[in-house]
């Protein structure tokens, strides 16, 4: 590609076409450009166009195309061809800085981006003169050019803020410092001088202040990794100027805009960051300067207004104070009562005030307000920063700070009392202040867990909170009402039970409030109160205590779901769930009405599921309704099926993916309640449950396995007689599941149910295949979790089909297989089996192998007999071996059976632990003793001799204990 | 300064690998790039003799005003050149003394100008003038001060053949001349490994040691100790073993002297000798010096404590056995005081030593507990300066990755978890990553105890969850991934890994083993 007018013309035409709104024109042009970009001179043509084209649009277009071209092609990837010719590379690097600096802003920005991409790859080794070239421009005196250089430098250096220390990185920084630090310092000084000279020229000031902000950002990057010698030597210069800039104000630079931060704010905010960096990392060197920064920043805070545009500055500034005040050797800066008072009065209190922006959110954007206020996504807010400062100050000055604030709180409350209608915000601030002062530790689950002992929370509750809760006009001062409700919720662990009980009916009333925030908070507070635990781990608030309010509570909760804006309110639905769970049988009379409402809601949300938490609690509530009602009367299960199946069918038919796992869980719950055989409505669905597409979604696996287990428990004979052709498909599911390290335990759940419930004849033909698959998996990937499940399964098989059957089927697959499994798997690994039931199954199974399997007595397997007995005694007596090989730490280990994809798991659909052996064996140790006794009488003398020759004394002692307990003796 | 204890290898175990059986103890990275000012606390590499001698005349006032200075100096040097090259001994002495005075000025001594005036040849020549001790002394002093400059200056002195002359002067019966020679040789040795080894090749060690006699005055011994320490100094390469073996007995002897400055330099010598591979450390330990070093940790003087602590820090960065030797010598009872030392540089070095002991086997970790080091460690995490906190964080991470479950629980009970969670706000990506590693270790311990939920609550309660969540926005990929992994694993209420294949149709999975296995063998 020659660098000539013809090519420039062609390129211009194609660039023009790439701007066309018509894809038929645009796409081919883009394709063409991509096809020629590998040619030498292509980038140079672009640079020529962006510099010289007469058409402004083409110039910008060429710049953007150039930047994208660089982004795609500049990096040289090992083993891949170099996509840009070396002469082009050299030419680009030689011209781009100059070009960038002399271009209009729109193009400059593109080229600056391109330079930082180039720089990331080539700087410093392959672009040694970049820095000097840039630094030379500082002399130009043209701040358009200087800001271009600074911006580019910023994009080159900002990675120093987050990269790890390495010799390579530090060598680069050193090189940058050597060439850049001194000129930057000179530029900084000169720029500040110019600000004085041009103090009345607003346009000049604007440019100069953007330079200063960029310079401050560069300072931050260059000082981030460690304190460079240069900056240590020049700290006086930098810090003096930074300090002056913090205290500087210029009317000309004040902006009208309330939202967007102006140049002054941006600069000061960056200086706060710089000071905070030095205070944190270079404390020793920065100590002489720190006090005056504290004063300046504090003054800054005192004089800065409430507008949103100052938020970043204020929150940065407060965070600076918060980090300094908790360091022991700066304690003295804050110690003085006047200083503390002034910080509290002029910094903390004003920033805790409820602003008009908050008020707007409270009214018009409740959801966001709640997320910020309740869930703590308030990291950059003023209120959060102010709270952090309170906490920081309390580290050393808890007493004085509490004292000062107490004074404030009472004066604000007095103000409020004078004229609540006008001064209600004072009370809001007072409550907020008390809350932030009292909270020392907090979790979502328990609220405040540690409180400031100097604040009397109960007294405040009685005197100031209860009034608002009791107010007969529920919709008056909604913010204060919400505050009061939140107070109860926050300090629930600190308030005595009587006060909580007093609050409950009041909270129930607030569920009816029009304000979304208010009724949401009421629901949330009730929900939290209902989860609190008292003595004996029972709920703190009992159903009996709730009896007088039950009807009102249920009514109001469901009515609130009809308020516009709360139709899918997750807090409300969660409160419904929690109420059901607390009230238990007390809800039974209301269920016939409520189930209709819940089903109706389900139908509505299944059209377009958008609130996962709401939906989850909705299903939980359904489960609770079923459980509680059917516990009282099993026969009602039919009426639930009648109500729910139409909706469920619709969900399954429309494949509403979010809901399918829930539906399976509710169906399992329903099916398990049935006592007689499986209803035909369920059988009709059975073949569909085996479809591979359902099993491809991980979230479906646990509930589907659970459902199939319920089918097997209730309908094994029906399946064997009417759906025998589905058995291979069922086993196919098992096969699919055990192939996966994450899901193999689910496969075993299914297999265990098959072995336990299916009539033996119906699966005879598949047994050998089942074991071969298990052995294949054991061979290819033997994980601890798999081995544990495998062990439980083979022992269950042994219990069900007998030890001889187990030994024969193993040895039939491969000679001596049985011995290998006993020796390599059972003996060394049985100690890892966890869970009561699982251990019992293994104990009974191993006992059978020891005492009911002739091959263990009379073949070469005999040598395994005593070790196996010893392993069994170990299972009884030794602590569980919970060690996990290093490489398995990150496979999800399920120690207890349960559902692993926790989110979709419904707590209230949970199934009871099932013991397939049940009462047949109460004490496996006694069973072992009795079985050994039986064996010894069958072949007298052999058992005692095997024991005395190779069983260790300790094990023998345990065994004798079992024999004594069973009152049997070995012969 | 202590290294970034971290080699990338160490971090490779992060997240996925569980625990690494062999712990890496940190090493100072050889020749690492520094951005900071050279350390003020380090032993001094070169020194100029600026002490005033009785006959000193006050410097003429013009010398102090910058404008006239250049002119005045060049004039003075011209005069010196004339005098030194004069045959008259009196003039030579005068010239030499004038040069010495110029070179001993407090500020801006004209080292370069003296060299460029070609005076060094004459000065070296004067060193051999046994007939004129005053001239010898003045020349030795001048050369000492030239050699105290940059490498280039030292090089000029060496290349003019001063080394053999100075070594010969060590034996001078005039104590002040011998002392000046010791001093000059110290400056040359301090320049770096190649001159150091050149001196050793010229037999400087026996010549120095010969002057180490009981009747030598303290001032002389101070210089001698300092020069010996410079002969132990620098790596790449280290001084050879035979040289070290020659010097060690005398250094140990000096380590029992009562003079603080001698003690300080002897300690620095030990710290240089232990700042290397384990074989180097072994040589020092075998001298039985450990109990004395531990004793010196208890001294008041910072100048002694700093190098003694550095030496101990180096030794515990060695093998488990070497660390154990330091523990047996009682280092753990000395460390708590140092961790509470008023100087933050001492706190930092002490924390570094603790971090290395914490990287040892769990028996050594147990000794940290028994000797009460956890409380001061947690204090440092809370209140130390940043560099100290960084070392203390390493201690926690090493401890939690090698400690038993009980030991980890104990550390958490001492408040370490809350303290490191607070430090997640540190403005240093590596420190943050190291903390996340420690948190992960603590969670692994909690998993073994079945107390993950309890730990989650604890982390949340002290504001740790907020901070970890916030780190998911960190610009550093490793940090954000580590934070994300913690959140996903422990804080979110919610993986395909097929080992075998299963065929499927639209309606069913196909049951049956795909092919007949060769032979099972577990």
Image (spheres, coloured by chain):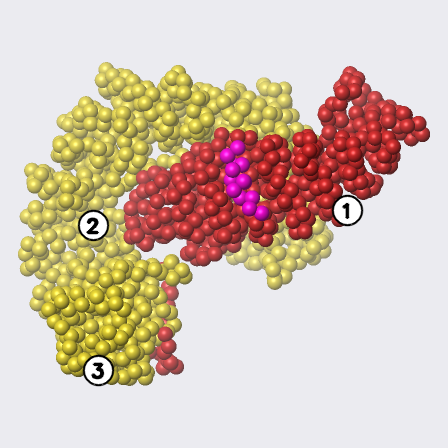
Chain colours: A yellow, B red
Residue A150 seen: no
Using the image, name the chain to which the residue with label 3 belongs: A
N-terminal-most mark, 3 or 2: 2
Q: How far apart are marks 3 and 2 (CA)?
A: 57 Å
Q: Which residue is drawn at 76% across and 30% down?
A: B176
Question: Which residue position is annotated with label 3?
Answer: A854
Q: Which mark is residue B202?
A: 1
Residue A448 seen: yes
Describe residue B353's horizontal placement relative to residue B156 as left or right. Answer: left
Q: Where is residue A78 in the image (x, y as percent from the top left)?
A: 60, 60
Q: Residues within 10 Å of mark 2 (few under 14, many from 20)?
A: many
Using the image, name the chain to which the residue with label 2 belongs: A
Describe residue A463's horizontal placement relative to residue B326 as left or right. Answer: left
Q: Position of residue B202 (x, y in %)?
A: 77, 46
Q: Is mark 1 on a helix, strand or loop?
A: loop
Q: Is mark 2 on a helix, strand or loop?
A: helix
Q: Residue at x 24, y 55 (%)?
A: A905
Type of secondary structure dominating the magenta stretch: helix
Question: Which residue position is annotated with label 2?
Answer: A618
Would residue B298 be counted in the magenta stretch?
A: yes
Residue B370 vertical position relative to residue A388 in the rendered view, above or below: below
Q: For the N terminus of chain A, which image quadrant?
A: bottom right
Q: What element carries label 3?
A: helix
């Amino acid at each position: 590609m020659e660098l000539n007018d013809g090519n420039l013309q062609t390129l211009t035409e194609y660039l023009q076409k790439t701007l066309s709104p018509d894809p038929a024109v645009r796409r081919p042009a883009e394709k063409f450009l991509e096809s020629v970009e590998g040619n030498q001179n292509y980038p140079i043509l672009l640079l020529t166009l962006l510099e010289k084209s007469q058409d402004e649009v083409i110039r910008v277009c060429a710049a953007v195309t150039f930047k994208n071209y660089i982004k795609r092609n500049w990096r040289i990837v090992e083993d891949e061809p170099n996509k840009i010719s070396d002469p082009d590379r050299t030419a680009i690097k030689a011209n781009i800085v100059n070009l960038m600096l002399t271009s209009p802003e729109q193009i400059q920005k593109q080229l600056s981006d391109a330079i930082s991409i180039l720089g990331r790859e080539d700087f410093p080794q392959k672009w040694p003169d970049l820095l000097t070239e840039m630094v030379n421009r500082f002399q130009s005196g043209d701040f358009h050019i200087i800001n271009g250089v600074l911006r580019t430098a910023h994009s080159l250096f900002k990675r120093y803020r987050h990269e790890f220390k390495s010799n390579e990185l530090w060598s680069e920084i050193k090189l940058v410092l050597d060439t850049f630090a001194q000129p930057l310092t000179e530029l900084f000084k000169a720029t500040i001088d110019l600000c004085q000279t041009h103090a009345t020229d607003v346009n000049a000031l604007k440019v100069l202040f953007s330079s200063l902000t960029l310079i401050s950002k560069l300072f931050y990057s260059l000082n981030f990794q460690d304190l460079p010698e240069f900056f240590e030597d020049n700290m006086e210069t930098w810090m003096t100027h930074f300090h002056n800039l913090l205290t500087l104000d210029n009317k000309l630079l004040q902006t009208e805009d309330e939202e967007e931060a102006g140049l002054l704010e941006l600069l000061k905010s960056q200086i706060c960051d710089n000071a905070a960096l030095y205070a944190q990392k270079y404390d020793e060197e920065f100590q002489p300067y720190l006090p005056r920064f504290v004063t300046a920043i504090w003054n800054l805070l005192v004089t800065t207004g409430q507008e949103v545009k100052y938020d970043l500055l204020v929150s940065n500034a407060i965070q600076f104070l918060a980090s300094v005040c908790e360091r022991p050797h700066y304690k003295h800066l804050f110690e003085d009562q006047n200083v503390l008072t002034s910080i509290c009065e002029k910094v903390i209190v004003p920033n805790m005030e409820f602003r008009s922006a908050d008020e707007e959110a409270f009214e018009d954007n409740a959801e966001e307000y709640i997320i910020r206020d309740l869930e703590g996504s308030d990291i950059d807010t003023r209120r959060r920063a102010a709270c952090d400062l309170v906490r920081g100050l309390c580290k050393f000055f808890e007493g004085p700070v509490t004292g000062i604030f107490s004074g404030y709180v009472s004066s604000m409350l007095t103000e409020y009392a004078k004229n609540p209608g006008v001064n209600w915000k004072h009370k809001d601030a007072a409550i907020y202040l008390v809350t932030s002062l009292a909270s020392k530790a907090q979790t979502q689950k328990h609220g405040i867990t540690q409180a400031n002992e100097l604040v009397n929370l109960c007294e405040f509750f009685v005197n100031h909170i209860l009034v608002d809760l009791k107010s007969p006009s529920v919709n008056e001062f909604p913010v204060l009402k919400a505050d009061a409700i939140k107070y109860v919720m926050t300090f629930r662990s600190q308030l005595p039970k009587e006060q909580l009980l007093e609050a409950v009916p009041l909270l129930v009333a607030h569920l009816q409030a029009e304000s979304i925030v208010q009724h949401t908070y009421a629901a949330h507070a009730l929900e939290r109160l209902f989860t609190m635990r008292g003595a004996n781990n029972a709920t703190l608030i009992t159903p009996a205590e709730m009896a007088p309010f039950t009807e009102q509570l249920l009514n109001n909760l469901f009515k609130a779901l009809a308020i516009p804006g709360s139709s899918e309110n997750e807090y409300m639905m969660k409160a419904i769930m929690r109420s059901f769970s607390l009230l238990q049988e007390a809800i039974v009379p209301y269920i016939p009405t409520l189930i209709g409402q819940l089903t109706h809601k389900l139908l509505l949300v299944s059209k377009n599921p958008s609130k996962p938490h709401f939906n989850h609690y909705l299903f939980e509530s359904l489960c609770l309704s079923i459980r509680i009602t059917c516990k009282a009367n099993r026969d009602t299960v039919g009426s639930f099926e009648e109500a729910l199946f139409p909706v469920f069918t619709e969900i399954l038919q429309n494949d509403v993916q979010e809901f399918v796992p829930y539906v399976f869980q509710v169906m399992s719950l329903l099916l398990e309640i049935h006592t007689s055989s499986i209803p035909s409505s369920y059988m009709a669905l059975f073949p569909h449950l085996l479809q591979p597409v359902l099993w491809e979604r991980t979230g479906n696996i646990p509930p589907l396995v659970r459902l199939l287990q319920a089918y097997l428990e209730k309908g094994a004979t029906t399946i064997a007689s009417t759906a025998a052709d589905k058995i291979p498909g069922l086993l196919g599911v098992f096969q699919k599941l055990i192939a996966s390290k994450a899901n193999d335990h689910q496969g075993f759940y299914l297999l265990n149910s098959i072995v336990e419930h299916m009539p033996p004849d119906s699966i005879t033909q598949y047994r050998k295949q089942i074991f071969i698959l298990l052995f294949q998996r054991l061979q290819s990937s033997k994980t601890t979790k798999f081995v544990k499940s495998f062990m439980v399964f083979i022992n269950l098989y042994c219990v069900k089909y007998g030890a001889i059957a187990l030994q024969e089927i193993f040895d039939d697959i491969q000679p001596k297989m049985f011995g290998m499994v006993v020796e390599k798997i059972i003996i060394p690994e049985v100690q890892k089996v966890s869970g009561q039931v699982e251990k019992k199954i293994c104990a009974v199974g191993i006992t059978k192998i020891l005492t009911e399997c002739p091959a263990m007595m009379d073949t070469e397997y005999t040598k395994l007999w005593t070790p196996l007995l010893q392993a069994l005694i170990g299972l009884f007596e030794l602590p569980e071996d919970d060690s996990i090989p290093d490489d398995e730490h990150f496979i999800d280990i399920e120690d207890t059976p349960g559902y692993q994809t926790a989110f979709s798991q419904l707590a209230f659909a949970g199934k009871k632990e099932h013991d397939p052996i049940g009462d047949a064996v109460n004490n496996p140790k006694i069973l072992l003793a009795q079985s050994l006794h039986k064996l010894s009488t069958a072949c007298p003398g052999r058992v005692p001799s095997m024991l005395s020759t190779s069983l260790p004394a300790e094990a023998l002692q345990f065994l004798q204990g079992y024999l004594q307990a069973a009152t049997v003796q070995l012969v | 300064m202590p290294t970034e204890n971290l080699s990338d290898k160490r971090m490779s175990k992060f997240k996925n690998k569980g625990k690494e059986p062999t712990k890496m103890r940190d090493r100072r990275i050889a020749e690492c790039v520094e951005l900071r000012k050279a350390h003020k606390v380090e032993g001094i590499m070169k020194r100029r003799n600026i002490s005033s001698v009785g006959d000193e005349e006050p410097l003429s006032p013009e010398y102090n005003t910058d404008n006239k200075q250049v002119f005045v100096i060049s004039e003075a040097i011209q005069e010196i050149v004339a005098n030194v090259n004069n045959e008259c001994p009196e003039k030579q002495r005068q010239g030499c003394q004038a040069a010495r005075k110029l070179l001993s000025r407090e500020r801006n001594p004209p080292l370069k100008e003296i060299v460029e005036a070609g005076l060094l040849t004459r000065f070296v020549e004067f060193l051999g003038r046994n007939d004129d001790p005053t001239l010898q002394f003045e020349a030795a002093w001048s050369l000492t001060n030239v050699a105290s400059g940059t490498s280039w200056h030292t090089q000029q002195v060496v290349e003019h053949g001063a080394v053999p002359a100075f070594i010969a002067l060590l034996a001078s019966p005039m104590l002040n001349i011998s002392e000046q020679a010791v001093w000059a040789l110290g400056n040359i040795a301090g320049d770096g490994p190649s001159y150091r080894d050149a001196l050793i090749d010229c037999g400087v060690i026996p010549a120095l040691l010969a002057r180490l006699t009981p009747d030598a005055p303290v001032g002389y011994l101070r210089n001698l100790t300092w020069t010996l320490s410079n002969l132990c100094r620098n790596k790449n390469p280290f001084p050879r073993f035979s040289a070290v073996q020659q010097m060690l007995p005398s250094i140990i002897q000096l380590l029992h002297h009562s003079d603080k400055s001698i003690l300080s330099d002897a300690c620095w010598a030990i710290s240089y000798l232990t700042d290397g591979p384990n074989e180097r450390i072994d040589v020092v330990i075998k001298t039985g010096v450990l109990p004395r070093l531990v004793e010196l940790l208890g001294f008041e003087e910072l100048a002694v404590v700093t190098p003694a602590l550095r030496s101990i820090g180096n030794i515990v960065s060695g093998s488990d056995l070497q660390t154990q030797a330091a523990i047996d010598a009682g280092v753990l009872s000395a460390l708590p005081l140092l961790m509470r030392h008023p100087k933050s540089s001492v706190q930092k070095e002490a924390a570094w030593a603790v971090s290395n002991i914490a990287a040892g086997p769990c028996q050594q970790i147990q000794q940290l507990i028994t000797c009460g080091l956890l409380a001061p460690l947690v204090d440092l995490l809370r209140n130390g300066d940043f560099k100290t906190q960084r070392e203390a964080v390493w201690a926690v991470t090493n401890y939690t990755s090698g400690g038993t479950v009980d030991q980890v629980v104990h550390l958490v009970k001492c408040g370490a978890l809350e303290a490191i969670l607070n430090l997640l706000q540190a403005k240093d990506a590596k420190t943050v990553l190291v903390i996340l590693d420690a948190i992960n270790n603590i969670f692994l311990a909690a998993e073994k105890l079945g107390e993950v939920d309890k730990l989650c609550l604890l982390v949340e309660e002290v504001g740790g969850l907020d901070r970890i969540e916030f780190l998911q926005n960190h610009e550093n990929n490793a940090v954000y991934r580590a934070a994300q992994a913690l959140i996903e694993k422990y804080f979110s209420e919610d993986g395909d890994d097929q080992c075998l294949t299963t065929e499927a149709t639209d309606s069913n999975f196909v049951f049956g083993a795909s092919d007949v296995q060769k032979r099972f063998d577990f």
